[in-house]
Image: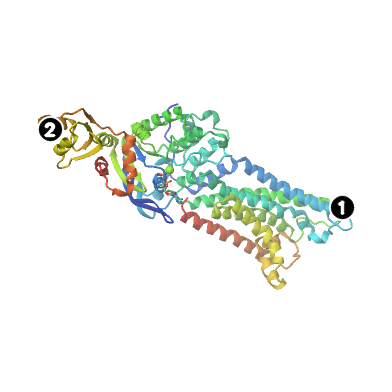
Amino acid sequence: MSTTTLTRPAGDPRVTPSRVLRMEWIKFWSLRSTIFTLAITALLTIGIGSLISGLVGSGDGGPGQNDFGDPASISLAGAMLAALATAALGVLMSTGEYASGMIRATLAAVPARLPVLWAKATVFAAVSFVLMLGTSLVAFLAGQAILSSRGFDSVTLADPGVFRAVVGAAVYLTGAGLIGLAVGALLRNTAGAITTVVGALFVLPGLVQLLPASWGDTISPYLPSNAAGSFMAVEATSPSLSAWSGLAVFAGYVAVLLAGAAVLLKRRDA
Amino acid sequence: MIEVNDLSKRYGEKLAVDSLSFAVRPGVVTGFLGPNGAGKSTTMRVIMGLDRPTSGQVRVNGRSYAQLKAPLREIGALLEAKAIHPGRPAYHHLLSLAASNGIGKGRVLDVIDMVGLSEVARKRAGGFSLGMGQRLGIASALLGDPRIVMLDEPVNGLDPEGVLWIRNLLKSLAGQGRTVFVSSHLMSEMALIAEDLIVIGRGRLLAAGPIADFIARASSRGVRVRSPQAAGLRALLLGEGVTVTNAEPGVLEVTGLDPARIGERAAAAGLVLHELSPREASLEEAFMELTRDAVEYHATTDALATAGRTNR
Ligand SMILES: Nc1ncnc2c1ncn2[C@@H]1O[C@H](COP(=O)(O)OP(=O)(O)O)[C@@H](O)[C@H]1O
Ligand SMILES: [Mg+2]
């Protein structure tokens, strides 16, 4: 065991955005939990989509096809639940570093700090979007095949609004993860961040239903998951925004939360 | 070179670091000594740009931490043991940090080898012992072959072999001309590895200087004199700069006079001495005294002088 220097690190001695991206890329793929969570997300999206496609309209008291909206939405229904998994993955990308103290090593390596947040978000968004787009395509195709084999209506990617809905599911899964990442960076605590994100994405829509109808109907479309629902559905079922307004609102949540995380990351002690 | 200039850090009501100034020079191991809660870790976090100072500044190689273009190549730190995601293999932990500063894979493998973790580098760090975690932290501190190495309580929880390894490592790093800054709450540990010493208590500087001075001061703390004519002797010895206390009947503790002078004066006055012995305070005692009275002392770089004087 030698204590002397063996090699001098070579290369241009500078922290650059692409180097920070490389750091986050290595961190992302070197955790088994990341790969596990991504696999769970894909399984949930495809599995639930197929399950619901296989169950709608069966039995007398069971749900009818129209209860789930259009055929595309039926096959993509799993994405709503699978977003739990991507949101959790996003949370853990941030809070995992605080829980272990790794954040100090990271920020000491990148004193400008903000490149770390951008790199995390970029790595997550790129990987998640590619994988989730594939996942939602598979879920869609499998769902349509099941529906048509059962003699129900089915649609193709060429039908109006369908391609948008398929891409929309990948956008929602990725956006939910980015919301998780930002909330994780804001709260720096795994349990708190997961509770917050689950509350905002999954519990809040139900609570708003309890408000007087005039209020509820006004607020409801602007909730993050409902805004996302408007670009994941081919036809609107309940009062909702247009697909593009929904996308803008959803992107707004992601942007505001990331901006908040950036401000606090820069300002707070690590 | 690390320079800390009038640094204060407040957490809410708690003033963790209070107008602290010191410099750490290259080529020697500098010990950063203080009891638990003295503000050592806080100071180190501020040096690393992790905590923002309430006032004052810190310079690393003449610049603020945020201005360092590739910080890992200038200063490497071990701030807390096992600051690594438990699910990530040691190799990837180091590889990711290296990547951010443009440090190659070859260097990562070298530092892993240097700290003796080659066998387990691909294993998840969650299963590492404290000692292995400490070695991994040191590997990450050495990644960029930095001119400054800063370690917070590196020997805590290590087995004797690990302690020895760290001591030798630090000495060899300093021997290569690097700045080596190591904290500890144990004077005994510092006495073994440090050449320079910075002592703090309650966030304030208590002493700074070569450890040799500290040792010299610590061991000249008084003379114990036993005499059947203690009262007469006392009157004889008292004078400018001399204190004499009655430790027990017939025994005097004298400071300000060396044993030879005391013996000569007693002989000249015809007084009988049964014992005349310099009282050697251990380094640990000296440290305890210095830090116990933390609030009484004022921060000066020659506070060592204060430490040597008996306050009664
Ligand atoms: N993040 C923090 N928030 C509040 N108090 C802190 C924080 N960090 C340290 N302190 C307090 O500051 C003082 C100095 O702590 P520290 O720097 O850890 O001392 P040392 O490393 O010398 O043991 C302690 O009283 C500690 O409780
Ligand atoms: Mg400490």
Subunit bearing disc 1: A
**From what the image shows, is residue B85 above or below residue A70?**
above
Residue B284 is labelled as none
The x and y percentages for residue A254 are: 59, 58
The x and y percentages for residue A165 are: 72, 58
The x and y percentages for residue A93 are: 58, 48
For this rendering, which residue is in front, B189 or B152? Answer: B189
**From what the image shows, is residue B215 above or below residue A233?**
above
Q: Quadrant of residue A187?
A: bottom right
Marks 1 and 2 close (CB-CB < 8 Å) = no
Q: What residue is disc 2 on?
A: B265
The x and y percentages for residue B233 are: 16, 35
Give, as a three-letter code, the residue at label 2: Arg
Element on which disc 2 rests: helix
For this rendering, which residue is in front, A203 or B59? Answer: A203
Q: What residue is disc 1 on?
A: A150
Colour treatment of the image: rainbow
Give, as a three-letter code, the residue at label 1: Arg
